[in-house]
Each structure stands twice: as C-alpha cells, then as structure tokens.
Amino acid sequence: MLWRARGSIRRDAGAADAGRVSATLQRIASLAALVTVAVLWVVASDTTWWRRAELAALDLWYHLRGPVAPTEAIALVMIDETTVDAFGGWPIPRQLLGDLVDRLIDADASVIAFDLLFSEPGRQVRDSTAGRSPDTATIDRYLLQDDRNGRLADAMERSGRVIVPYAFVFSSDRANVAGLPDVIAGQAFGIVRTAPGRSVDLPVPAGLIVPAERLAAAAATLGHVSVLLDADGSLRRDLSVVPFDGLYFPSLPLEAARLHLGIPRQAVVVTMGETISLGDRTLRVDPVMGLTVNYYGPEGTFETYRLADVLDGTVPPGAFAGRVVLIGASVLGLGDTFSTPFSRTLPGAEYLATVVENVLRGETLSRPAWLATVELGAIVVLGGLAFAAMRAPAIACALALGFLVAGWGAVCALAFARLGVWIGAVGPVLSVISVGAVQSVGALIHERRRRRAADRSARRLSHYFDPQVAARLSGGKGLEQGPQTRQAAILFADIADFTAIAERLSASDTHTLLQQVHTRIDRAVAAAGGTIDKYLGDGAMACFGTLAPTVEAPRQAMLAARLLITDIEDWNRVRQHEGEQPLVLGIGVHYGPVLVGDVGTARAAEFTVVGDAVNVASRLEALTRELDAALVASDAAVEAARACGAADELRGLIPKPAVAIRGRQQAISIWLLPRDPAGNGDSQEAI
C-alpha cells in the first residue's frame, strides 16, 4: 500500500538547466583564464613584475641545487682590512701592486686581472732614507702623485699577461675622458656579425672611466667591468658585449678567459643576439648580449689569499701556477659588492671569477630559443590538466593541482641543476593556479547559490512536510539516489469518531482543532527523533529510522507514542474543564523493512515509505477501536524496542496472542495499552 502526501513536489527543470549553465560558464571562464595567462606570457614576460617572479623562482633553483665547488683554475688575491692597515691605509700604493705582479709572474700565474679602476693618482710609498721630513702640505701632494717610478706599469709590461679594467657609464658627467681613447678603441671585437631575424637591445653608454694612460698602455689587454642589475637589484648577467662609438667591446671576464685559453683576438667572433665564439667554444647570449651567470656559492667559494700574505711570502710556492688570478678589494665600504642568489655582499672580484669560471667550463645559464615553445606548451597542457582535475573530489583535486605545480617546478629545477638551462616557471604555474582559482570560485558561487535555493525551498516545503524531509527534498536528494530498503518503525495516530465531532463544529473550528491535534503529534514525534511522513486528516503517519538508519528506531517510536498519549491526556483534562468532548486517540506501531525514496514522476513526485510494515502499522491503529486500546504495537516493534534498552516506553503494555489483521492472511502477536476511564491510557503493568 502506498501512502500519498496531500501535496506533491514539482521538480523544477529550470534548476537543472541552471546547473548546466553554471558548469558551462565555469568552463568558459577557465578557458578564458588559460588564454589570458598565455597572452600575458607573450606580451608581459619582459615586464618588471613578471621578471621579478621568474628571478625569485631562479633563486629557488639555486638553493635547491646548493653550492657547487669550482675548479682550481682561478684564485683571488684580496685587499682586506689587514692589508690596508699593514700598508698605511687606502688606496694601496701602486709600487706594492707592482711587487704583487712580479710575485705572480714568478709564481707562473696564467692571467693577472685587476678589479681596481686606476682612474685616479695612486699613493707613493714614503722612502725612509730620504732627507729631512717635508711639511704636511708637501706630504699630501707627494701622496697624491702617481706611481712616479712606474713600478706597477713596468711589472705589467714585463708580464704581458695583465688585464686592467675600465668602465662604461650611462651618465656623461661621470666619465673621466671625452670620446673614445685609442687605447680603448684597440680592444674592440674584430669580427661582429648580425644573425638574420634576431633582434638585440643593447644598453648604450654615455661615456667611459678609463685607467691612467701609462697603465692602460702597459696592460696586455683591457676589459670593461660595467654591470647591469636585474629588476630585484641582483647581479645575474655579464655584459659581455657593450657598444660604444660604433664599436663593440668585451668584458674583463671574457678577456681573462680568452688570454687563459691562448685565443687571439681575431679568433673571437660575435654574432649579435645569438653567440660569442672563443675559438672552438660557443657561448650563447641573451638579447642584451649578456652571459647569464651561473653562481657557485656565496663569498669564499673561490680560493682566496690576502695581498699582505702574498707580499710577505707566506703563500705556498706554486699556489698560483697556471691559474687566472683576480685582484680586488674586500674592505668594507671600499670594495664593490653585489647581491646574488647566495649572498647579499659578494665581492666584485669573486663575481668576475664566477664569470671567468663559467666561460672556461661552458657553464653559463642558457635560455635557448626553443624554450619559448616549451613554456607556451606547458601553459596550455598544465592548464588543461588543471581543468580536468577540477572534476575530481576536493582533496584529490587539491593534490592534483599541487602535483602539477610541484612537477613543473621539479622539471625546471632539474633542467637548471643538470643542464644549466633556465626554464621559465611563472607561466605554467600561473596557468594551473588561475584555472584552479576560477574553477574553485565558480564552484563556490554555484554551491552558495544552490544552498540559498535549497534553504528557500526548505522553508517553503516545511509548511507541508516534516523539516527533515523538506531539507532532503530541497537538497535534491531523492530520485537521484533511488529508493533504499531500511529497517524502520512506523507509527499511525488517529482520533476516533472525528467525523462526528467535526459535524458539530464550523469549518473554521474544525481547522483549528486539526491544527491543535497535528501540533501535538508533531511535537511528540520530533521529541522522539522521528519524522512526519504525512498528515491524514485527523491523524498522521510518522517514521523512525528512514532518513538516518538507527537501531533506536523502535524505542523512538514507542517513546513518541507514550509522549503523544500523555499530551492528549493533559489536553483532555483542559477540554473537559472547558465543557468540550474529550478526544479518543488510537496509535499503531510496527517495525520492519520498508522501501524509502521518491515515487512519482520527474514533474510530480513525493518522498515516502512503501512496504508491508506501513500497511501493518495502519491496521494496528485501526485495531485500537476494536480492542479499546490507546496503543497497539506489534511484537516485532516491542521486542526490538526492548533489545535497545526501552523500559519506561514499554510500561503498561499487555501481550495478546496472535491476532488476525484485515487484508493479511498471517496473524501476528501484538501488545496493547488499554484506555483509561477518560478514554486514554491504562496503568496496568506489562506482562
């Protein structure tokens, strides 16, 4: 037997259509996000904010890889605080630097490169054998004089392997010469080619800072030490080729590597925007003709000696044999320092050493042209995978997105550490994050709208259905899940002879009386943890254990019956006092299997329970009139209630032998609670 609700639920087909539209909009928004990231990569990858993000990722690859030990091809001789104190302050007298060059020649150094701009007069060492001491003014003039005896220049000429630096400046008021001196012009690259289809964007200096003419002429070659900092203030590239006055000039590290390798100047070929060839070595450059530096570690990574130790002979013989020796300063506030991935204060000489080592070992970082295709492809592929992952459950989706981001990071880190290839990470990672964010926001908006709609629907349905059933129906949990078989307790309650009572009342009074009856039934059922399936005129059908299966269902049904009987008893006393006729309540309870779910069509459906247990409970309620009982419960319901600890709920029940049930062939055993003289329960003890 199927018990129908008095109203039916009309499924709103528009809600399903809205869900499909929402999903379509999310897909379109995700595709738009993916296209936006791809377009940004094309048009904005050279902007400051994008480059900062890529540089931050590059620093991460450095830290993941860790420091790397350089070869022994390079050594540093540093002018530190001890050296400055030992020789009377800064600047160090050039005669001492001449002595240093002589010692390095004797030590068979391959190349000697200064990271000191000799653009101002040096300081002369005072001769202790001279005559009377001059006055202070004479001493000051004397100290500001250049290396008058030319000891440094002579040592450089004897060596034939010393490199002296000069610098390009981008403000003409910082230059110390006008135009391009001949000694600098002679250092320009001899062979410069233009690669077809390749564009370059070289920084154009406004002037130069050059060393003293005597020193420049004595050097084997000169190289510039100008630098160009990145957007985050760090130094990551060597300006290996700089244009000036129609010529192109090499950096000091490039010249140091060339001399060490014994490559003549005419064997160096520059292909603009593409490569620099040192003999059989090919170095790839970026659009500003720079070499991207591959740092090995923080300060102290290269073997370093103090100048004072070299001059006093405490450095072991052979320490410089066959090596490129870079001479610089590490005095706080005097020597130049740079921010790098490993250090915020890397001395300039150690930076130059890093570039020389990169060139000698072919370890500069590269960004080949084909990487553009790889990065764009990664943006599309990873974004597509992120879109597919959004269909998975929340936890699986989050893990998938994290895996995509971490996976691409691993590819970039391995390419950097093993191949020296710098792959952009921002675009692909941004595509995953943007698609995931769009999908998540869309899903959140959709869920909020669904919940608001469900709440509105629940509020409307709660006027006609039990609140728990209304919440289930408004949440769309019905036909989609399909009917389910469960063990449940069914309770039917009805007022005897209500038709005769209503005959004497007006329609309004009848409605009021029904509301009072239904209120008491609802109150008792809710207090016991059940749900009202439907109101049946002057009665109702309640279910226990249908929405949320529980072994407590039989006890809950018996508790609801006792609460309702007590409530009606109290109400009858009030009605009798007011001169109104008492109401005679009958309750039937049964426990057994039922089918729980939606029945009907997609246009008109109702959520209910179906099964023999429903029919039996209804017949038991009808028996209350024949047996003059307030409650008739099946033996199955009573035994199940007793099994889960019911005691007070079963008080006063009397067992009866098998009773025939109308419409059923098989009789069942029952328990009943007799009515009291006022028409309700009895106080007899259960047998």
Image (spheres, rainbow, N blue to C red):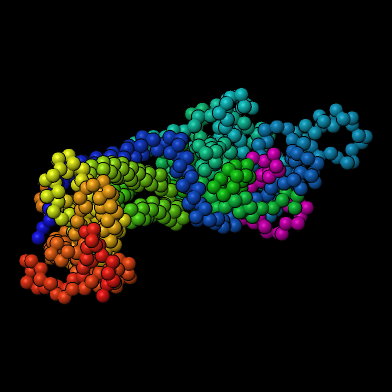
Quarter containing the N terminus: bottom left
Q: In percent of the image, x 37 and y 45: which residue is there? A: 433
Residue shown at the point (48%, 51%) measured from the top left: 61
Q: How many marks?
A: 0
Residue 652 vs 506, above or below: the answer is below
In magenta stretch: residue 205: no
In this view, the residue farthest toward the right is 132
State whether residue 129 appears in this view. Answer: yes
Quarter holding residue 141: top right
Q: Quadrant of the C terminus?
A: bottom left
Name the residue located 52 percent from the left edge and 39 percent from the top edge: 232
Give how far across and how far down residue 288 sits, in percent. 46, 36
Q: Is residue 317 magenta?
A: yes
- Say whether residue 404 is visible: no
Residue drawn at 17 percent across, 39 percent down = 508
Q: Residue 554 at x, y = what percent? A: 26, 66
- Locate residue 54, reporting x and y percent: 45, 43
Task: Say left or right for 353 vs 138.
Answer: left
Helix, strand or loop for the magenta stretch, by majority: loop
Drawn side of residue 554 relative to residue 160, left or right = left
Q: What is the span of residues highlighted in magenta in the rendered image?
A: 310-336
Q: Nearer the viewer, residue 127 or 566?
A: 566
Q: Is residue 411 left or right of residue 456?
A: right
Q: 457 or 616: which is nearer to us?
A: 616
Q: Nearer the viewer, residue 512 or 350?
A: 512
Residue 572 in percent (x, y) is at 25, 52
Considering only vertical position in the picture, is 685 above or below 610? Answer: below
> Which residue occupies the foreground of this view, 311 or 44?
44
